[in-house]
Image (cartoon, grey):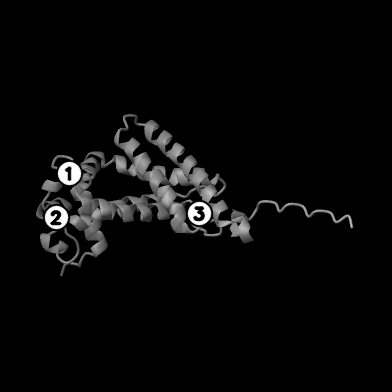
Amino acid sequence: MARKKSPETIIEKGVQAALALAEETPWAALHLKDIAEKAGLSLSDFHGVADKGDLADAVEPFFDKVMSAEAIDANEAARTRLFEAIMLRFEAMEDYRAGLLSLMRHREASPARLLSLLSARQSSAEWALVCAGLDGSEDAPLSLKAVNVAWAMARAERAWRKEESPDFTRTMAALDKELREAEERGGFWRRMRGRRKSGGEGWRYADDADPAPEKNDA
């Protein structure tokens, strides 16, 4: 009796097959039976596990896993660790460039897929922070930090779509720029969290020095 394949295996094989087929066929024109055949699976393997929309949603998590595939040097600066983790993802995406571009065009014409992508972006950013060892919440909540990183990843992806260099010159430059700006925004929000209410004087930073007390000459 053949061993039953796990849902994770079916989805992963389905994602790879769909991206391969999308190199020649627009994503919207793909059929699940063709994806199953390309993946070396039967159509019934996908029943109750995933349809084509589920496979589209599984693409981002598929590439997220790559960010933890290599050890990141803990002695590197925080931004460098994050940069390296995210670049692992872009490098893995390159092997599926044509299929991914087809999926991206499909998403742009589908509000439902774009909504799903927003949630996936947040998850990707949170995992990037985990892989870089930056998932602690002592400076700011993980979800807040991830909003910044998700924006940086999205902007870098726009550069990746236009990439022509085998060295990812355009992508790396965009990612570095966006992460620097994200770092600046993160510093602003950390300071905002440190503010406290002070009577009728309004809000101020908690690390602002209090004025020296006036001397009493009496």
Q: How many marks?
A: 3
Q: Amino acid at mark 1?
A: Ala
Frontmost residue, 200 versus 125: 200
Residue 69 appears in view? no
- Residue visible at 27% across and 54% down? 115
Label 3: few (<14), some or many (≥20) within 10 Å? some
Residue under the image location 33 percent in, 44 percent down: 92
Question: Badge 2: few (under 14), some or many (20 or more) residues near its Cα, within 10 Å?
Answer: many
Percent x, y for residue 5? 21, 64
Q: Residue at x 37, y 56 (%)?
A: 123
How far from the left and from the top, in percent, is residue 201? 62, 56
Q: Is residue 100 above or below residue 64?
A: above
How much space separates mark 2 and mark 3, taking CA atoms? 37 Å
Task: Give the crowd class for mark 1: few <14, some 14-19, many >=20 residues within 10 Å.
Answer: many
Residue 32 in which image quadrant: bottom left
Q: Nearer the viewer, mark 2 or mark 1?
A: 1
Give the farthest residue toward the bottom: 1
Q: Tell me the number on the disc at residue 133.
A: 3
According to the picture, the residue beneath numbered tag 1 turns out to be: 22
The residue pinned by badge 2 equals 36
State the residue at coordinates (52%, 43%). Answer: 184
> Does residue 84 appear to the left or right of 22 in the view shown?
right
Q: Quadrant of the N terminus?
A: bottom left
Which residue type carries mark 3?
Gly
- Callout 3: SS: loop
Tell me: 21 left or right of 147.
Answer: left
